[in-house]
Amino acid sequence: MLKQLSSFVVKFVVVCGKKRPQVCLCLCMMLCLTACFEPQEGCTDISATNFDASADKNCDDCCVFPKLQLEITQRYDTLTFLENRPYENSGGQWFILKSVSFYLSDFQLFQNGDTAFVSDTVGLRSFAPTGSDTLREIFTDDFVLVRRTPLLNEVGTFRNDGVFEKVRFRVGLDADAQRVIPRLAPTGHPLRIQSDSLWHGRAAGFVFAQVIVARDTLTGTRPDTLALTQADLPGFFVEANGSFVHETGYNFTLKLTADHKKLLEGIDWTTGDISAWKTRIVANMSGALSVSQ
């Protein structure tokens, strides 16, 4: 093709150049520029994080759309929370807070009377509501398992932009997600069985939140596991009102602060009453979790 084009250009220059040299030169330059132009392929969707303003042709499935992200800060009062460290409560009791973990799901953002959700979905195998059969169900994939790390957790793809006046999400899982079979979930998924998994068997399902604590700082003290289930936290949501801005073409990052001193406030570690400890944690939870941007 290039060889034929070159031959045509040479003949055009010879014939035209004898009659109108200046006109011939301009036409020749325009012809060459047109022949050499190749459309630049890239993402032409302005809402994508990899939008390419110089692209002339949209690429196939190359656009990357914004994610709703949760940046999590865990602390004990003014101190950064570190696992397996001694802390002092308001009553002057020293104890060791070994770990804190909990599930979040059902993320909702409210804008001018409308509710926006992440768009990702996932197919998971689950136990049927009754009987011993299993089935495949499609879920909104906004499950987050909060642990000491990572600090930045990806909730899912979120393409709505603008200003949102309210954020709402669940601590724990809904009834359908409680039936998911963890060993059949994708590798790395929050509902997959992991080394510190909150799955406690089919009868108990997933634990919504778990605190592991040693009631004093003595070497031989065995830690207690405080497991909060669906019965402890039925339909418990964290809500925040304000002005949450998602700029077009950028990830949408919200900040969740978990203050474990507030979470454990009022617990008397000398009683050994795990049931009372759990009740206190449930009562404290709304004040221990806060959302900002």
Image (tube, rainbow, N blue to C red):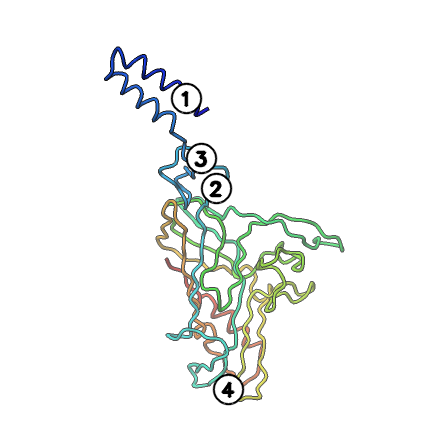
Q: Where on the picture, by quarter, is residue 241?
A: bottom left
The residue tagged 2 is 62
Q: CA distance from mark 2 to mark 3?
A: 9 Å
CA distance for labels 3 and 1 = 28 Å
> Label 2 to label 1, Cα distance in Å?
34 Å
Residue underneath mark 1: 5
Separation of residues labelled 4 and 3 (CA atoms): 61 Å
First along the sequence among labels 3 and 1 = 1
Q: In the image, which is nearer the foreground, mark 2 or mark 1?
A: 1
- Coordinates of residue 45 in the picture (x, y in percent): 42, 38
The reply to whether callout 2 and callout 1 are in contact (CB within 8 Å) is no
- Residue 252 percent coordinates (x, y): 41, 52
Above or below 238: residue 268? below
For marks 2 and 4, the one nearer the N-term is: 2
Name the amino acid type tagged 2. Cys
**Cα–Cα span, label 2 and label 4:** 54 Å
